[in-house]
Image: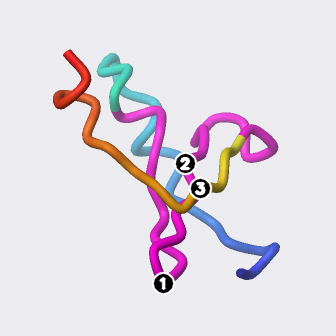
Amino acid sequence: MSTNATDNTSDATTDAPERRYAELHIGDDEFVIYDRENHQAWIQSTVALDVDELR
């Protein structure tokens, strides 16, 4: 995984809070969920679920 990954942070500056967080699939069932406004806030996992499935 690249330590220099970037994202278009202008997408996160909407009133929709669900746009603040993004998922990056880094291959072979590994995912990174991160905060588009704070690139130091992220979680890496081998499992990802749709938030709507948890409700």
Q: Earlier in the sequence, mark 1 or mark 2?
A: 1
Q: Is 39 placed above or below 21 here?
A: below
Residue occupied by mark 3: 45
The answer for how far apart the CA atoms under marks 1 and 2 are is: 15 Å
Q: Which tag is nearer the camera, tag 3 or tag 2? A: 3
Identity, as a three-letter code, of the amino acid under mark 3: Ser
Labels 3 and 2 touching (C-beta < 8 A) = yes
Q: Is 54 placed above or below 47 here?
A: above
Provide the secondary structure element on which disc 3 rests. Answer: strand
Question: Residue 31 location in percent, x, y?
Answer: 52, 63
Instruction: Name the residue located 32 percent from the left edge and 44 percent from the top edge.
Output: 49
Magenta span contains residue 25: yes
Provide the secondary structure element on which disc 2 rests. Answer: strand
Question: Residue 35 location in percent, x, y?
Answer: 60, 38
Q: Earlier in the sequence, mark 3 or mark 2?
A: 2
Residue occupied by mark 1: 28
Q: Which tag is nearer the camera, tag 1 or tag 2? A: 1
Magenta span contains residue 36: yes
Instruction: Name the residue located 74 percent from the left edge and 38 percent from the top edge.
Output: 41
The answer for how far apart the CA atoms under marks 3 and 2 are is: 8 Å
Q: Of the numbered discs in the image, which one, if any, rests on residue 16?
A: none
Q: Earlier in the sequence, mark 3 or mark 1?
A: 1
Instruction: Name the residue located 36 percent from the left edge and 26 percent from the top edge.
Output: 14
Labels 1 and 2 touching (C-beta < 8 A) = no
Provide the secondary structure element on which disc 1 rests. Answer: loop
Q: Is 51 placed above or below 23 here?
A: above
Labels 3 and 1 touching (C-beta < 8 A) = no
Q: Residues within 10 Å of mark 2 (few under 14, many from 20)?
A: some
Q: Which residues are magenta?
A: 19-41
Q: Could you tell me which quadrant the C terminus lies in?
A: top left
Residue occupied by mark 2: 33
Question: Residue 18 location in percent, x, y?
Answer: 34, 28
